[in-house]
Image: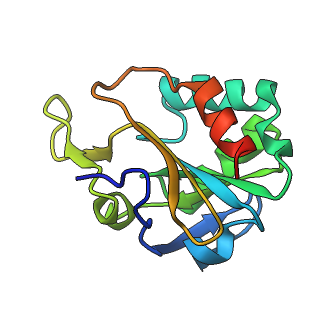
Amino acid sequence: MPPTEGEELSDFEALLCDGETFRSTALSAALADRGGVVICTGFAFSAIARNWWTQFVRAGWDEFEDVAVLGVSRDGPYAQNAFLRWLGSPGFRFFADVDGEVSESLDLLADRDHMAAVSTPWRSAFVVDADRTVQYAFVADDWISPLPLEEIEDAVASL
């Protein structure tokens, strides 16, 4: 079962991309002083990811004070960096979950029946404090649901 409020997110480690470089980084090291927002999407350049992340840019999420905004998707680090450059927002970073281990550690990995031998995380968002304790959790029950932006922003404000 995916993490819920009050639970601790696993301290997974994966390549963290910043638009130019990538380094193996633990979630705990990627969080800012107040915590972070961890957003899982299937693939970086998918229609849903493009839609969501451009909304985050317009909403100013890259300017949260002392709160990191971290994406997780199944693409490799070069695609993640290209996506971050495409967004034009240096405040976001992405974990490259190439092998699906991050998504699996969050119990989000799901086989995609219409995509042969492909699995992706359920679209989701977790607001966590600096100790990785989940303050807010959203996991979509379908592949196209929008994120509840205002609820996430309220949870960030409460960190």
Q: Position of residue 80 (x, y in %)?
A: 60, 52
Q: Is residue 149 left or right of residue 158?
A: left
* Residue 51 versus residue 7 in the image, above or below: above
Q: Is residue 6 left or right of residue 127?
A: left
Figure quadrant of residue 88: top right
Please name the colour scheme applied to the rendered image.
rainbow
Residue 40 seen in render: no
Residue 6 or residue 18, whichever sits in front: 6
Residue at 76% across / 44% down in the picture?
Answer: 85
Q: In this view, does 35 lie to the left or right of 127?
A: right
Residue at 69% across / 24% down in the picture?
Answer: 55
Q: Position of residue 24 (x, y in %)?
A: 58, 79
Residue 68 seen in render: yes
Residue 35 or residue 158, whichever sits in front: 158
* Total numbered badges shown on the rendered structure: 0
* Residue 105 versus residue 80 in the image, above or below: below
Residue at 43% across / 61% down in the picture?
Answer: 97
Residue 113 or residue 146, whichever sits in front: 146
Residue 125 or residue 81, whichever sits in front: 125
* Residue 39 versus residue 103 in the image, above or below: above
Residue at 48% across / 30% down in the picture?
Answer: 46
Q: Position of residue 108 (x, y in %)?
A: 29, 50
Q: Position of residue 2 (x, y in %)?
A: 30, 52
Figure quadrant of residue 8: bottom left
